[in-house]
Image: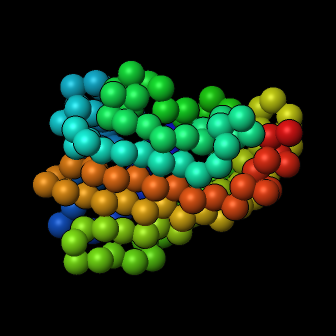
Amino acid sequence: MCFFCSECFTIDEDDSEFAQRLRLAMDEGDRSAIDSVIADDCVLQISGSPEALPFAGTYTKADVIAGRVPRDDEYCEVHSLQMNVWLREPNRKYAVLCHKKATVHSTQKSFEHDYVVLIEVAEGKLKKWQQFHDTHDLVRAFS
């Protein structure tokens, strides 16, 4: 499961076609399909220090297409993931509250944490993804 999982994109009827296209593109790894659902100037930001957390960093559309954005299954086993839209602004911005339980492959340490993803959709494409974590518990699990 990656951070573009189907749970994230049960967001709104107005964006349901986009959500379905993004989910299929990411699940299948189809580069041309990914290209059609992510804006050229899209920025993906995941909080934390890349030295401590393997998925932290800032990524572009090219990174997504090239497969350089780390997937959950590369570094941990996800036991459960709950995501709920908390806020939808009229300009197609979303705040998604997330709760994950997982075990890190390299340390065999389990963790449970809450985080928030801010998503912006523009012209039927993903424009911005910002993922904010409480990194204290995550750093402990990855160390």
Q: Is residue 116 above or below residue 128?
A: below
Which sits in the foreground, 52 or 18? 52
Q: Is residue 79 above or below residue 85?
A: above
x and y, in percent, of residue 115 in the image: 60, 63
Q: In the rendered view, does 134 fall on the left or right side of 14?
A: right
Residue at image point 45% right, 76% down = 86
Residue at image point 46% right, 67% down = 96
Q: Which quarter of the figure has residue 27?
A: top left
Q: How is the image coloured?
A: rainbow
Q: Which quarter of the figure has residue 109?
A: top right
Q: In the rendered view, does 105 fall on the left or right side of 85?
A: right
Q: Which quarter of the figure has residue 90?
A: bottom left
Q: Is residue 64 above or below residue 15?
A: above
Q: Is residue 58 above or below residue 129?
A: above
Residue at image point 48% right, 61% down = 117
Does the rendering let one see residue 15? yes
x and y, in percent, of residue 57 in the image: 55, 40
Which image quarter holds the C terminus?
Answer: top right
x and y, in percent, of residue 64 in the image: 38, 31
Which sits in the foreground, 34 or 83? 34
x and y, in percent, of residue 121 in the image: 25, 58
Count numbered badges in the picture. Answer: 0
Does the rendering let one see residue 26? no
Q: Work out which residue is located at the far left of the displayed protein and give it.
A: 123
Residue at image point 57% right, 59% down = 132
